[in-house]
Amino acid sequence: MFYTLVVFSLFLIEIIYFKIAERFDIIDKPNERSSHALVTLRGGGVIFYFGVLIYFFVSGFQYPWFFLGLSMMTLISFLDDIYTLSNKIRLLVHFVSVLLMAFQLEVFSMPWYYLIVTFIIIVGVINAYNFMDGINGITASYSLSVGILLIWTNTKYHFIDQDLLVCSMLGVLVFAFFNFREKAKCFAGDVGSVSIAFIILFALGLLIIESGNLIYILFLIVYGVDTIWTIIGRLIKRENIFKAHRSHLYQYLGNEAKINKLLISFLYGLIQFVIGGLVIFYANKDLNSQLIFSVVLILSMSTFYLVLKNYVIRKYA
């Protein structure tokens, strides 16, 4: 009954947001770097935050530092969607938000280098999530995949309140209803991609700390491989990696090869889910088995990625 009420509330909030976005012209206009051709409402991913907001009040204000960091990250990203803020302002807010998450994760009680590694991973993944939000359905499909993996793993380790994960994923489901379409009603915007990345990273951080096993970072390997190899390729070409582009594999598949974009989004999520299942299986093995699995997985995925991308570029680009 509780989850039904959450879904109903989130649908209502999303519809109200659409009215606000239409009233104040919060839209995404297509340009030469876009993968869409129609003017579409921006910022529909704000619903991810409201899923956590509902949980926060119902749970009696659990994880307050995390929630404060998420609120700051969501607000600055939403304002950036509307006004395009200074990089210095955004970076300052992101820095404080990550520190708040690290405090909630109790990283400050660990050796100092844990904080540095945590900061680098969180900032890197948040930016990767933002870069990968380029076609209909990909943020929703991938986030649901990772979210279900976290919910599955949580039944064993109980590293986080399950309601937080479920409420977050219900927000993703509501967003998917409006976004996982040939003609999307809305896009996630920075507010969506950044906030859901922040939520997933918090849960993933708790899982790694509780289990003491870094292998779970592979829950994000599909996005990781696409992002890292795209950055490397752009650096080799001496391109500005912070400028908008259409150089990711999923963009070449959708824009140049003309493969159905919803199919691409679905496959990104499905592949990550299958890999996540293997990660959960190998997490129970000895350290040597985990290392061999991780190395073989990273190398095989990188090889497949580079061969496929090179083929698509040569044939279609």
Image (cartoon, helix red, strand yellow):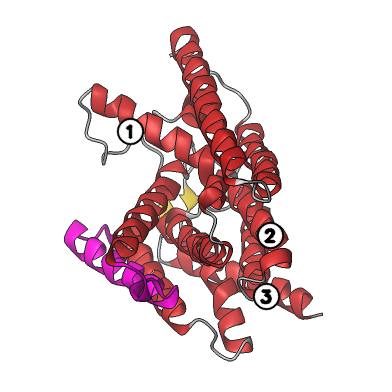
Q: Position of residue 4 (x, y in %)?
A: 78, 74
Region of the chain picked out in magenta, as a range: 83-111
Q: Is residue 104 magenta?
A: yes
| 203 or 60, nearer to the observer | 203
Q: Position of residue 215 (x, y in %)?
A: 55, 48
Mark 3 or mark 1: name the one nearer the start of the chain.
Answer: 3
**In this rendering, does residue 290 appear at all?**
yes
Question: For this view, does 152 lie left or right of residue 49?
Answer: right
Residue sitting at x 48%, y 30%: 251
Q: Secondary structure at mark 1?
A: helix
Looking at the image, is 61 positioned above or below residue 165?
Answer: below
Residues tagged 2 and 3 counted as in contact (Cβ below 8 A): no
| 45 or 201, nearer to the observer | 201
Residue type at mark 1 is Ile
For mark 2, what is the residue? 153
Q: Quadrant of the C terminus?
A: top left
Looking at the image, is 42 positioned above or below residue 272?
Answer: below
Question: For this view, does 142 lie left or right of residue 77?
Answer: right
Q: Is residue 193 magenta?
A: no
Few, some or many C-alpha atoms within 10 Å of disc 1 (few <14, some 14-19, many ≥20)?
some
Residue 264 shows which numbered tag?
A: none
For marks 2 and 1, give the one nearer the viewer.
Answer: 2
For mark 1, what is the residue? 231
Question: For this view, does 70 lie left or right of residue 266?
Answer: left
In space, the residues marked 3 and 1 are separated at their CA atoms by 36 Å
Mark 2 or mark 3: name the one nearer the start of the chain.
Answer: 2
Few, some or many C-alpha atoms within 10 Å of disc 2 (few <14, some 14-19, many ≥20)?
some
For marks 2 and 3, give the one nearer the viewer.
Answer: 2
Residues tagged 2 and 1 counted as in contact (Cβ below 8 A): no
